[in-house]
Amino acid sequence: MSGRPHPDLVTLAAAAACQIDDICDRFEAAWKAANETTPRPVIEAFLGDTAEPARTPLLGELLRLDVYYRQRLGETPRAEDYATRFPSIASAFVVRTATIPFS
Amino acid sequence: MSSSGSVTHWVGRLQAGERDAAQQLWERYFVRLVGLARKRLQGLRPRAADEEDVALSAFDSFCRGAERGQFPQLHDRNNLWRMLVVITARKAVNLRQRECRQKRGHGAVLDEASLQQGSGSSITPGLEQVLGREPSPEFAASVAEECERLLGRLAKEDLRAVALWKMEGYSINEIAAKLGCSPRTVDRKLWVIRRLWEQEPLP
């Protein structure tokens, strides 16, 4: 199993893929700006009202970024952290694949 | 070998006539040359040996040319990659044209052994002879234009940077370090680049 983006992203239209990329860039910038006085970004705020078919792959990408930056802070993200907030996505799968290193 | 300095070092040694430098460059670029040849050979019968022949011949031509000082502009990894791309693409085109002629003339695609058996005839020269041509300046220019056109379809600067670095052989982790982002972000941007290029209307 690879740590690739959500499978839906592969078949998404280019415009929607660019939209997801832009949102993820802003989410990552917010994570990098987070510190003791600046709060961490909240996935729900960046997911917003994005409609399908972009919504599910966007959620997958935001979740993976969230897992990545939490791990960099020494945390151990668990699937349960996300399962209740996002019941529509297989959070266990996402958390597991988010931890696979790239070569 | 991941730094630009390493490539520059081995290119310099190759141009100075040191053959072991070719081995270092070979190990770095051969896989990608095979991949490039495979794309250019799409539509023909899949034969791994052909793709490797194209890459092998391209690299051999490159090394011989570098030793003869034919590439004075060859001073860093960017120019090295560009040169390898052009030579490989040209050789793949030549092979494709050769195979099409074989199909029309004999109703079957001949393998390298068959071509060598017929190399005594002027009609069916060996594969080595077919692959022995160098890219013309016009073809090199057309390849460069195509690369520029594809990069021009990427509206965001970070997408263009990722595309170029990936073509130059940087790993996802190396590109992530350059951009100061997560490796997953680089992987996502590569998917976006592919989507943009795949959805390009056919000419």
Image: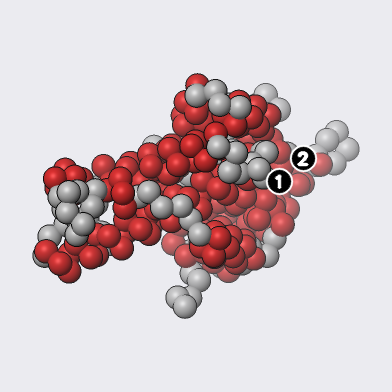
Name the quarter where the N terminus of chain B is drawn. top right
Number of disc labels: 2
Q: Is residue B168 something that shows in the picture?
A: no
Q: Find out whether the residues at labels 2 and 1 contact each other: C-beta distance under 8 Å.
A: yes
Q: Residue at x 21, y 57 (%)?
A: B122
Evaluate whether label 2 is on the same chain as label 1. yes
Q: Is residue B151 something that shows in the picture?
A: yes
The disc label shown at residue B72, or none: none
Name above or below for residue B44 compared with residue B79.
below
Secondary element at tag 2: helix
Q: Residue at x 67, y 24 (%)?
A: A74
* Residue B2, quarter of picture: top right
**Closer to us: B192 or B91:** B91
Say what amino acid the circle numbered 1 marks: Glu
Chain letter of the residue carrying label 2: A
- Report, in whole angstroms, how far the alpha carbon at label 2 lies from the one at label 1: 6 Å
Mark 1 neighbour density, 10 Å: few (under 14) some (14–19) many (20 or more): many
Mark 2 neighbour density, 10 Å: few (under 14) some (14–19) many (20 or more): some
* Residue B149, quarter of picture: bottom right
Chain letter of the residue carrying label 1: A
Q: Residue at x 67, y 38 (%)?
A: B76
The residue most toward the left is: B107
Point out residue A19 in the picture as x, y percentages from the top left corner.
63, 63
Q: Which residue in the structure is indicated by mark 1?
A: A28
The disc label shown at residue A32, or none: 2
Point out residue B69 in the picture as x, y percentages from the top left corner.
60, 38
Q: Residue at x 17, y 54 (%)?
A: B121
Name above or below for residue B119 compared with residue B194.
above
Secondary element at tag 1: helix
Left or right: B44 as drawn, with respect to A99: left
Say what amino acid the circle numbered 2 marks: Lys
